[in-house]
Image (cartoon, helix red, strand yellow):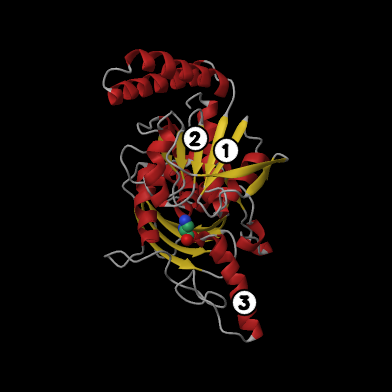
Amino acid sequence: MGSVIGKLIYWLNHSICSNFKTQNNEKVSNFVLYIEQIVIILHKNLNKADMKVAIVGASGAVGQEFLRVLEERDFPIDELLLFGSPRSAGSKYTFRGKDIEVKLLQHNDDFKGVDIAFTSAGAGTSKEYAETITKYGAVMIDNSSAFRMDADVPLVVPEVNAPDAKVRPRGIIANPNCTTIQMVVALKPIEQLSHIKCVHVSTYQAASGAGAAAMKELYEQYRQVLAGEPVTVERFQYQLAFNLIPQVDVFTENDYTKEEMKMFNETRKIMHSDVRVSATCVRVPSLRSHSEAIWVETERPVSVKEAKAAFAKAEGLVIEDNPAEKKYPMPLFLAGKDPVYIGRIRKDLANDNGLTFWIVGDQIKKGAALNAVQIAEYLIKEKAL
Ligand code: 2RA
């Protein structure tokens, strides 16, 4: 799309703008910007020719996963742009055999002609750059918490509420938090059988949820403990090696952590539901893939047989459940996999309307990059970019 749009924008800037230059300059440039946006959107929908994609935060754990996922899924890309902080600008990453240099993220026109921008550089950066990223029509699929609960920003897990992605007045779609994403994939098939009134969940979150540096720190802590050296603690509240930490993110005023409140609020928004979610989020010394023990209470009792049949048909979910053969999902064996795995499916002995199960999902993949890419794939399929 770049060349056609480029020419139109050049023409708009140079013919219209120069004709009106003597008038109020700011008004003219706003007018031109509006026209440009209309042309971009019309062109995108009437005559989609090529696809320009950007990754913001390319050097981070999720940014790197975006590169792998886009390549793995043969995502239609004609041009890929990588953006990063001053620290990562200038680094090069290989995509489809070609080296791409990370550009410095700045307030300029670098996003002109970009169709989709996958952003994962923290909430502060997303807030600061949203306007720069979206002003020429790019759809920003944002992995941070910056906009998740904004009423005019859809929060999307394609298996659950894909059509929400089409209504995005600000050009922004939010990717939910990893623990919520994998949980709602498992809740959806049950909700279709009987409304879920409440959920109790305990998470077992791998070190990588706190970023690439946190993974390194866990390795280093194990090495230090085994070598009898003092242990470095920078990324977690305490030593994580040989330990569990019942705190992910900071505490809020009700003594739940932000991570726990995300599970409450985001689940309701994605599922369009009044469900109440009470979570305890725990950091565990595994490297990758989050696990969750979940108890749901439905309006009517749902049998294990019904639940298993619904899980078996559900999109993005794989059942691994055979107690006799010690079959259940485990994070060590599921890193790098696309689906959410579910096992230990049984009746809740403490609640006649309750079911309980265990899920594992790669939180950098389905919990972040893959979910965002699936949103983009849905928009392309629906011609709703
Ligand atoms: C964590 N859920 O595991 C967070 C990352 N989004 O720390």
The span from disc 3 to disc 1 (Cα, nearest Å) is 37 Å
**Front disc: 2 or 3:** 2
Residue 192 in the image: above or below residue 144:
above
User: Who's the residue at 38% across and 16% down the image?
Assistant: 18
Quick one: label 1, few (<14), some, or many (20+) residues within 10 Å?
Answer: some
Could you tell me how far apart the alpha carbons at marks 1 and 2 are, in whole angstroms? 9 Å
Residue in front for this viewpoint, 75 or 112: 112
Disc 3 marks which residue?
Answer: 222
Q: Earlier in the sequence, mark 3 or mark 1?
A: 1
Q: Secondary structure at mark 2?
A: loop
At x 49%, y 38%, the residue is 158
Cβ atoms at labels 1 and 2 below 8 Å apart = yes
Residue 16: % across, % down: 38, 14
Specify the amino acid type for callout 1.
Answer: Leu
Sequence-wise first label, 1 or 2: 1
Which residue matches tag 1?
81
The amino acid type found where label 2 is placed reads: Asp
Q: Secondary structure at mark 1?
A: strand
- Depth order, front residue of 100/17: 17
Query: What kind of residue is marked 3?
Result: Tyr
Residue at image mark 2: 110
Q: Earlier in the sequence, mark 2 or mark 3?
A: 2
